Image (tube, rainbow, N blue to C red):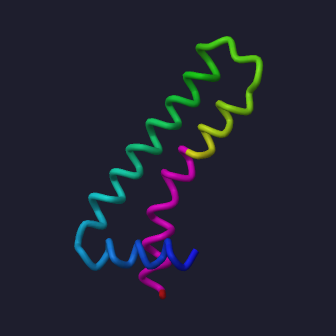
Amino acid sequence: MDEVLEAVDVVADSGFEGVVTWLLRLVGLLAVLAGLGLWLFTDMGLLVVPAVVLLGGLVLLVAPTVLLALAELA
């Protein structure tokens, strides 16, 4: 976790925090849409894969905001 916070701190110091945040949110949104597509439009008997993709997308949507807030507090 310390390495992730250090990487976020470097990004925040470089001034590209807004770009990185929106890029991760875009990837998270695409992952959520891909997970929904796998779940709704395919004949997958195993629902674990779409669930993992959906959860990963949700984490990518929320994680940049949380990590930048933690980096500013530290």
Q: Whole-percent x and y of residue 19?
A: 27, 58
Please tell me in which quadrant of the rendered image residue 17 appears: bottom left
Foreground: 48 or 68?
48
- Is residue 62 in the magenta section? yes
Q: Is residue 33 above or below residue 40?
A: below
The secondary structure that dominates the magenta segment is helix
Residue at point 32%, 59% (across, down): 20
Q: Residue furthest front?
A: 3
Left or right: residue 39 compared with residue 28: right
Q: Quadrant of the N terminus?
A: bottom right
The span picked out in magenta is 57-73
Q: Whole-percent x and y of residue 35?
A: 58, 30
Q: Residue furthest left?
A: 15
Foreground: 14 or 62?
14
Residue at point 42%, 43% (across, down): 27
Left or right: residue 15 compared with residue 50: left
Please tell me in which quadrant of the rendered image residue 46 appears: top right
Left or right: residue 8 compared with residue 45: left
Foreground: 15 or 10?
10
Q: Is residue 39 above or below residue 20?
A: above
Q: Residue furthest right?
A: 45
Q: Whole-percent x and y of residue 16?
A: 25, 66
Left or right: residue 26 compared with residue 1: left
Q: Whole-percent x and y of residue 68?
A: 43, 72
Q: Is residue 26 above or below residue 8?
A: above
Residue at point 23%, 72% (across, down): 15
- Is residue 28 in the magenta section? no
